[in-house]
Amino acid sequence: MADSSPEIVRKPRADAVRNRERVLEAAKAVFSAGGNEASLEAVARHAGVGIGTLYRHFPTREALYEAVYRREVAQLGDLAEQLQCAPEPVAALRRWLRANVEFVATKKGMVAALALVAAGSSELQAYSFDRLTKAIGTLLARAVAAGAIRDDISAEDVLRALIGMCYMHDQPGWQTTALRLLDVFVDGLRVQPDHKAPTAKPAKKPKRKPRQA
Amino acid sequence: MADSSPEIVRKPRADAVRNRERVLEAAKAVFSAGGNEASLEAVARHAGVGIGTLYRHFPTREALYEAVYRREVAQLGDLAEQLQCAPEPVAALRRWLRANVEFVATKKGMVAALALVAAGSSELQAYSFDRLTKAIGTLLARAVAAGAIRDDISAEDVLRALIGMCYMHDQPGWQTTALRLLDVFVDGLRVQPDHKAPTAKPAKKPKRKPRQA
DNA sequence: CTTGTAAACGGAGGATGCCTCCGTATATGG
DNA sequence: CCATATACGGAGGCATCCTCCGTTTACAAG
C-alpha cells in the first residue's frame, strides 16, 4: 500500500506489550538455567504464550537473545546512575564493579549465549561497550573529582580490566578470585596518601578485607 | 583406570586416522565460515565422509568444537616455541601477540563458538589458559633475561590484556586498533632507556602504575 | 453498549538438523 | 587367501525451528 503518512503508529495493544514483557522475563529465567540449549518452546510455555506469539515479537532466536542482552546492559547502566548519588565515590565504583561480577555469576548459562549474540552484531557490541564505558566514566569522574583516585586511567581501561577478570567465569572459585582482584584493582586506583606518584610501590598491607564477611 | 587387559591396543586403522584428520580440517573451514550455525552434516559432506563417521570420532558437537579448539591453542603454543629461537626477544613477543590478533580475525565466525565451548568445560578452559600463559611466559622470560623489558609483569597479566584488546573483535577496524594497542603495550613493557622512548605516543600520560603483586 | 475491524493470539505441521543403529566394506594379522 | 575386528555410510526416529492461517480480542467509532 502506498501509505502517504509514514508516522501513523497506532497505540500498541495492551496485551501485546504485556506479552512481550512476559516473554522477556521468561527468557531470562529459562536461559539462565538452561543456557543456550533451552528451547524457544520452553520459553513460550514458561511465559504462558503460544509459540507463534514469541516468534512475532522476536523473529529469531538471536533477536530474543539480543533483547535480553540489551535489557541487562541497560540495567547495569541504570545502576551506575543510581550510584551517582551514593556518598562515597570510590565505594560506589567498587560496588558497581562487584555488581558486574555478580551479574556474570548469576547468568551462568546465559553468558556464553549473550557473548555469542554480542559477537554477531557489531551495532549491539558498540552499544553495550558504549553504555558500560559511560557507566564507568561517570563513576570514575566523580571519584577523580573528589580527589579519591588517580586521574590517568580511562574508563575503557577499567572496562577491559573488568572483562579480563571475568574471563575465567566458570573455573571453580572464579568469583572469589575476581572479587579479590577487583578490590586490589580499586585499591590501586586510589590516590596513595604516602606516595603521590606510585611508580614502584612495594607490596602494602591491605587496608580492607578482600572477602565479604 | 584398572584395565584388566593390559595393552591390547591394536594399531589404529589408517583410514580412521585419515578420516579423523579430514573431519577436523573440514570443521575448521566450515565453522570459520558459518560460525555455530553450520550443520554437522555439512561438515561431514565437506570432509567427504558419512555422518556416522563424524559421530564416531566426535560423539557430540561440543567434542568436535573442543578438538578444533585444542588444535588451535596448540598451534599458538607451538608458534611460541618456534619464536623462542628468534634473535630479537621483544620482537618475538610482539609477533606472537600479533599472531593472536590475526588468529581471532581469521576465525571470525568460530570465535564465538570456541568461546562457548571453552566456557562449557572448565578443564578445557584451564588447559588453554595454561598453555597460552606458558607460551607468553617463555617469550616474556627471555625478553626479561635479555634486559629488554621490565620484570614485574606476569604472563597472566599479558594474557588478560591481550584478551581485553581482542574483545571488540567484530567492530569495523577493530584489528587495526588492537594491533596499535598491542604495539603501545609492548612499548610500555620495554625497559625505558635513559632518554624518552623513541616510538612515543604522546596522546596520553605514559606513566603506568605497576601492579602490586 | 454495540459493532466493525485491525491487530494479536495460538498451535498444527512442514522442514531441518541431531544422533543412533546396523548392514556393508575394508584393513590387518595369521 | 581367510578370518575377523574395525571402520564406514546413511536410513530413520526424534526434537526443534519457524511459518502459516483460522480464531480470538482489544480498541474506537457510532
Image (spheres, coloured by chain):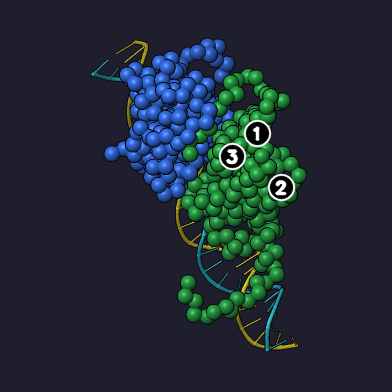
Chain colours: A blue, B green, C cyan, D yellow
Q: In this rendered view, identify the residue nearer to me: A86 or B60.
A: A86
Q: In this rendered view, identify the residue nearer to me: A133 or A190.
A: A190
First reached walking from the N terminus: tag 1 or tag 3: 3
**Label 1 belongs to which residue?**
B190
* Disc 2 element: helix
Residue B84 locus on image (x, y percent):
70, 49
* Residue A123 horizontal side relative to residue A22, left or right: right
Q: Chain of mark 2?
A: B
Write the residue at 51% across / 37% down.
A164
The vertical placement of A145 against A26, above or below, is above
**Label 3 belongs to which residue?**
B151
| Residue B159 falls in image quadrant | top right
State the quadrant of the C terminus of chain A: top left
Write the residue at 65% across / 74% down.
B11
Task: Check residue A146 in the rendering and tell me which mark sits there, or answer none.
Answer: none
State the quadrant of the N terminus of chain A: top right
Whole-Å distance between the Cαs marked 1 and 2?
18 Å
Write the residue at 69% across / 39% down.
B90
* Residue B5 horizontal side relative to residue A19, left or right: right
First reached walking from the N terminus: tag 1 or tag 2: 2
The vertical placement of B26 against B154, above or below, is below
Does residue A35 appear in the picture of this structure? no
Mark closer to the observer (2, 3):
3
Q: Are marks 1 and 3 in contact (CB under 8 Å)?
A: no
First reached walking from the N terminus: tag 2 or tag 3: 2
* Mark 3 closeness class: few <14, some 14–19, many ≥20 residues within 10 Å: some
Residue B129 locus on image (x, y percent):
54, 48
**Label 2 belongs to which residue?**
B83
Q: In this rendered view, identify the residue nearer to me: A86 or C18.
A: A86
Q: Amino acid at mark 2?
A: Leu
Residue B195 locus on image (x, y percent):
69, 24
